[in-house]
Image (cartoon, grey):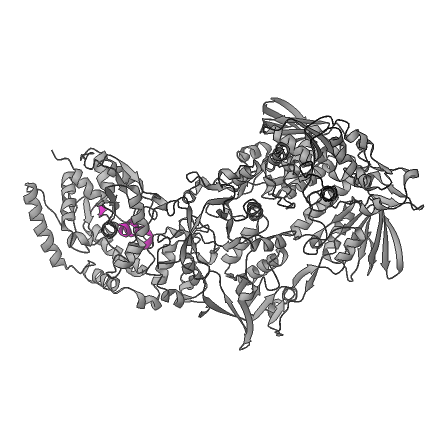
Amino acid sequence: MNEATLINDAPLLSGLNKHQTGDNISECLTCGVCSSRCSWYDGEGGPVPRQIVRMAQLGLDDLLIESGMLWDCMLCNRCTEECPVGINMDQVVRQARSLQAADKIMPEDLKAGVKNRLDLGDVNGLTQEEFVETIEWLSEEFTDEVGDPDAVIPYDQKGARFLYLPNPRELGINLMHLTAMARLFYSFKEPWTMSSRHTDVTNWGYFIGNDDISRKMALQIVEATEDLEAETLVLSECGHGYFVLKTLLEKLIGRKTKFNVVAMPELTLDMVEKGIIKLNPATLDEPVAYHDPCNLGRKSGVYDIPRKLLAFCCKEIVELTPNREHGVCCGGGGGILQDSSSHKRRMISGKPKADQIRAASVKHLVTACLSCDRQLGELVKHYDLGVQVHTVVSLAVEALVTN
Amino acid sequence: MSDSQKSVLILGGGVAGLSAARTMYERGVAVNLVEKDDHLGGKAMNWACMATKTCENCGACLTAELVDQVSHQANTTIYTQTELSGLDRNNQGFEAVLTGEYSGRVVVDAVLMATGFSPFDPSALKSLGYGSHEKVITTVELNDLLKMGQISKLLPEHSSPKIAFIQCVGSRNRKLDRNYCSQVCCKISLRHANKLIHLYPEADITVLHMDLQVIGKEFRTFTEKLSNRIKLVQGVAAEIVSDRQEGKLTIFHEDETIGVRTALHFDLIVLSVGLGPSENFGELALKLGVKPDPWGFLSLSRSDFPKGIYAAGTARGPMNILNAISEGRITASRITNDLNIAADTEKKFQVAVVGAGNEAVLVSDALSKEGYPVVLIDSGKNIFLKDEYIKHFSNARLVSVEGTVGNFTLGIAGAEGNQKEIVGAVVVANGVERLQPETNLHSDRVVTLEDFKDYPEGKIPSKVAFWMDYSGPENKNNSRKILEMATSLAGKGKIVHVLMEKMLVHGLMGQVSYDAARKSGVKFLRISDRTSGDFSIEGGQVKLAYEDTTLPGMKIFVYCDILVIPEKIVPSKDTSLFAQVLNQALDTEGFIQSPNSRYRPVASPRKGIFFAGNCHDEIDEDDLTTEISAILAGLGYLGRNGSPQGQAARVIENECIKCLTCLRICPHGAVVLLSSNKPEIIPEACFECGLCVSNCPAKAIRQEAFLDENLVEMAKETDTFIFACERSAFLARNEARRLGMEMNEKVHIQTVRCTGRIGIENMFAPILKGADRVIVAGCYEGNCRSMESGAFAKRRIEHTIADLGIDSNKLSFYPVAANEPDKFKKITSDTE
């Protein structure tokens, strides 16, 4: 039998219980609600939420670090959604991940990504020169494709209305997505730009629980946006990016910003509703299911916007069960997806999602986060679900009616 | 009656309103009872009987009796399907505007809000799937099915269903603004589980709880016994899914032994929903100028109510049926006092308080303050008396109690020899014994709770640990004391750990106190039972070693400077002696007072004998205040209304052979021995059960209303003749009719005060007159108002059948509670 001694002034504990709710783990009732709601359901491995809180509460930091639960946790907050005392697992786990003693368990890929992001402005290590090269080439292709010299992918344009912050995958393995976004911006008929500095919507400082790094990353973007005097910062479809740069932003950096922040689905919907663009509602004429990204839905309260936009592109939306605030995580949240060694684990953590998708009997699955998109795609393949996965904005691009 | 012009308006015809209405009537106050439903009884009226072989003492069946009594009492107007729409204060009292089936104005002197509660609606918690899964039901629905005998709709007969109860749904939840314990749900679920085991002997039942609230009379023994048959699991579930296993409901739960998440599958899941304020209650409170607490209950102190307005029952906060009934009586009694009814004419006789200790003193003081001359019979020493006019026998022992209510002669053995004292009533408040905890370790670092209480602040070291269940399961008093101390110490910067199996969060503020303790930094360590932990001394510190139930497979060490362990609470040494002297029963744990719900919380089958404090129940300071009020309400009634009910049994002098059977068997101590060795029945003490009548070998005892010849007068050629107890089976018949159940019409019913009255010749009389069969239907064992009287009838029938070889279809005994209409229907229709 393992042994442990309770420590009264353990480092984790001293970093928690600072607020009335959220990190108030000393108030845990040990009711067990969280353990019954973990997105892993009864899948093998994975975190046991109550044990995380309990170890934190009792000063058993080492035990918690060695348990493996810290980096299995997907920070989806499903477990604590109905916590009767308002504890928020996201805060507890991130605080624990930030402990010095937890350095040794931080996935190498996360470490490298954080370094890249801080040093170069891109999590994948894309340099400014490489960015410029990529964008200029892509822009030329885009101009040719559209056949309009005004159809470009601009960068570092001062005073543009929109500054688009892409997902790093849009500058690497998924360049087509960036072109698609360019097509949308082009159809908005508004000046837009990208930035060659700090090009990346992700914030892995958030994943590793380091608020200083998270703040630094966010500030780089805030400053770049303000330097370019953009009116609105437009976030690519990214769950945790939205959570940090929209939901948490002002609290995190401790000030207001000189610009608005919207996510791509919201901006696109706005353009549709204003009649600036038109979408073909028959783009998908079979029922479509929508997956709520946890960071967007449960953690930021955005449920209706993506569904509304989706409704403009398809005939029928069916709901996965459960959904919205009770939605099951895709199984790739909280930094798991970013750890290249996690595939096997993610296929277990995502099984409840896979079961849910299968039960919905749909051919198309749509989400609003490129990480979810990737994980869902892998689940579809692994569990042979026969479903095509889209992001809602990429679907909107497909649905775009051009005159 | 001179005070008959006084009148009250009672809002709500549930148990609290009904018992208040009954008390008002007894004291000559005119009652206006307003009920929004179309019948009286409230939610308790729908409650199923929880008895299996014997009564489980929930008290639900008493509702039907109260409805019956109040419906037939004089000076009472009942307005069903009616609500209060306005209230104006006038010179003397109020003018109430009623709307509904009756619309109009009623002038009253006082208003009592007995508006009850609403069960929590779990559809607010979507993940539980309530409303979408047919087999996720609430305790309320389970109860309805049990009452109507329709549980087989959900669980096929003779099946071995897997059933889960999920506790605290809508309770102890700050997020839902319900951060209070609903007090009753754990008991309800355990009784339900017990009932289901009875109906489905092969059932596999799991109760998932946060902290099982095992509190109160006989409940520890009940739970312990039941725990051999069902699984009690700490940790609730907040999600139910239905697609994991064909036809089953699934929850995910942390495995207790290895701590991983695992799927549990069930056929039926019962959500144990909490109690909240009654719907639209806020509006009503506003009309009456009463301010509810943040949860919506009227928990404010009595003095904060506007003049002339009162509240009772679950309108004041969650409570069980018996307490709601008691509250109704207490509040009615308070209202009559405030209205100055008969204060002058009330006979305030001398009352004896028996017991040593603080509780006896508190009771004595309170009775004195109300004008009762008190005789304190104290077996201990050093009692500090606050009130001078208490007559005090110290170091004395109660050795005999003769006579009946209003006229008890007490024999007291004391320092000054044997003495006699005449009193009208006796209150037993002899407290409990606190045994030193059993430990081999003698160290000044390990102290008892009692000793630690008196520690000077400077002497308390920086790390303090309490082991709440060291000397046995948690109890109210110790856990509250420890909670208060722990919170205060943590507030002073001490490091405080509390080792416990469960936290008892009794009282409306129990959860708030527990929340405050955790917030102040007290750490609560969970142990599955006493044997999974131990302590030793190491390096001048106490080293606790235990396994935390939330971290399976882990041995955890806690170091502290001092370990505080509570004493074991057991009945006082003199308790069984008192029981003998007073002719009262002990409960399963050896505390005084039978658990019979008809006399709970404070009374006894022997009129004029009361109980207070921990000698008979698990009582904290607040409870004791309530108990004292209940005793005062009871004494007031005795003092005022010492007249017989009119049908007391009577010994025929020249027929009596002085065998004294009656004296021995009377459950109410109503038979006294006159100087001529002749027994006499004192009408004031007689409950008219007739047990003495049916047992008198000389047939020398008569009850005019229940003469043998009258009992079967109506028996003609009828298929089934039933002797029905008027407070159980007969009420069940009435309830079956109200519910429109189809019943066998070829039944003749003869009501009796108690089935104990039915002798062998009475049983056979209908058969001789041509009846196909005779049924004697009375109370469950443990529920009979005359204690063993009903059981006596049952045994008599069993013996008769066995001795004479009679077909048990011809003659049978069935226990049928007042809230078992379905059972009544079944026993009368089942002719095979």
Tell which of A159 and A288 is nearer to you: A288
Residue B694 placed where, x, y %? 80, 39
Is B375 drawn above or below residue B756 in the view shown? below
Whether residue B587 sits left or right of residue A110 in the image: it is: right
- The picture quadrant where one finds residue A316 is top left
Q: Residue furthest front?
A: B805
In this rendering, position of residue B8 left or right of residue A317: right
The location of residue B345, given as percent across then percent down, is 82, 36
Residue A75 visible in this rendered orientation of the protein: yes
- Quarter of the image for residue B748 reads top right
The x and y percentages for residue A236 are 22, 48
Between B224 and B287, the one nearer to me in the picture: B224
**Residue span colored magenta:** A230-254
Q: Is residue B540 left or right of residue A260?
A: right
Nearer to us in this view, B406 or A220: B406
**Residue A237 in picture, x, y percent from top left:** 23, 47
Q: Is residue B579 magenta?
A: no
In the image, residue A251 lies in the stretch drawn in magenta: yes
Q: Is residue B269 above or below residue B262?
A: above
